[in-house]
Amino acid sequence: MDRNTSFNLELCVLAAFTGEGCFLGSAVRPSFEDAFEHASIEAHRHLVIANQQRDFSRFPYNRIYFFSRNRALAEKILDRERVNHWPSPRIKLQLEYAADFFFIVRTIFDGWNSWHKGPDERLLY
């Protein structure tokens, strides 16, 4: 693949709710694939985990369980995060790797924190 080739990606973040919980799913896919399908499956998988997992002491199970019991908090966080003008991100690190048939880019922005850090109340996906 030519490094200058560009293509569109579709981002889907799904928040699925039950009476008392919130279950998140997400996907980034080329526009010819269905990101919603993967995000839906992931959210459903989190519902199954919350109902069947026995050990919630480690990540990501602790957050899945926490938000499976805290719908109101998840809704409050999601409402707070709706903004009209997101700040422009500043790139902190960007690494690239190219081979004959694929190209990988890893980009980290200022202010980024690893998804496993922070308290159980940190809702992100």
Image (tube, rainbow, N blue to C red):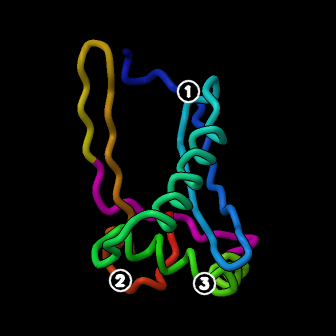
93 to 106, vertically: above or below: below
Element under label 1?
loop
Tell me the kind of residue under disc 3: Asn
What residue is at 25 percent from the left and 45 percent from the top? 95
What x and y, as percent, mark residue 55? 31, 73
State the count of labels: 3
Q: Where does the image place residue 78, in percent across and percent down from the top left?
A: 67, 76
Q: Which is more toward the observer, 121 or 53? A: 53
| Residue 77 appears left or right of 111 | right
Mark 2: amino acid: Gly
Q: For mark 1, what is the residue?
A: 7
Residue denoted by label 3: 70
Separation (CA) of disc 1 from disc 3:
38 Å
Quarter holding residue 82? bottom right
Q: Which residue is mark 2?
A: 118
For the residue labelled by badge 2, is the local secondary structure a helix, a strand or a loop? loop
Q: Earlier in the sequence, mark 1 or mark 3?
A: 1
Residue 116 included in the magenta stretch of the image: no
Rounded to the nearest angstrom, the CA distance separating label 2 from label 3 is: 17 Å
Which residue is located at x 47 percent, y 80 percent? 122
Q: Which residues are magenta?
A: 81-94
The dominant secondary structure in magenta is loop
Does the magenta portion include 87? Answer: yes
Q: Residues within 10 Å of mark 2 (few under 14, many from 20)?
A: few
